[in-house]
Image (cartoon, rainbow, N blue to C red):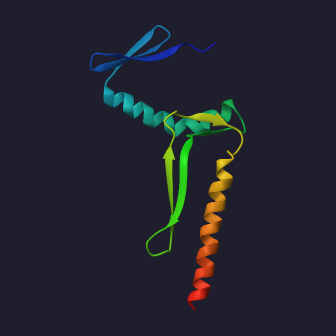
Amino acid sequence: MAKKISLDPEGDDFILRLGTAKIVLSAENVLDLCQSALSHRQYIMSRLHPGSVYATPVARMNAMWDALEENILLEMQFAPSGNVIFEAVPDSSKGFAEKILDLLARKQSSQLSRH
């Protein structure tokens, strides 16, 4: 059985507890640990839940052409609810893909009409 782990504020620092062990961390240490954990997240999740994808929910997606109409700009606003584990592509991805395809189709037809 895994030992209980917690991270609690204490003054300007934080206390990382794992079982009976305690480690004092500065705010900078905590931020560094968060970044390190993110870099290992997908690897860990693939071992614990094969076939799953660890993702950050997207609240809103949009796609548009840049000013020169050479590149598609993707805009994503992330949900504040945090990270989730899911095994299927969300339905919203279909609408997003359709929007990108529509942008491409409209650009191709407008280029043809310019010649």
- Residue at image coords 54%, 37%: 40
- Residue at image coords 35%, 29%: 29
Give how far across and how far down residue 112 sits, in percent: 61, 86
Give how far across and how far down residue 33 sits, in percent: 42, 31
Q: The N terminus appears in which quarter of the rendering?
A: top right
Would you say 50 lies left or right of 11 here?
right
Would you say 5 lies left or right of 94 here?
left
- Residue at image coords 62%, 56%: 96
Q: Residue furthest left?
A: 12
> Compared to 15, does 99 lie above or below?
below
Q: Quadrant of residue 95?
A: bottom right
Would you say 24 lies left or right of 1 here?
left
> Compared to 82, does 94 lie above or below?
below
Q: How many marks?
A: 0
Would you say 70 lies left or right of 46 here?
left
Q: The C terminus appears in which quarter of the rendering?
A: bottom right
Q: Which is nearer the eye, 90 or 24?
A: 90
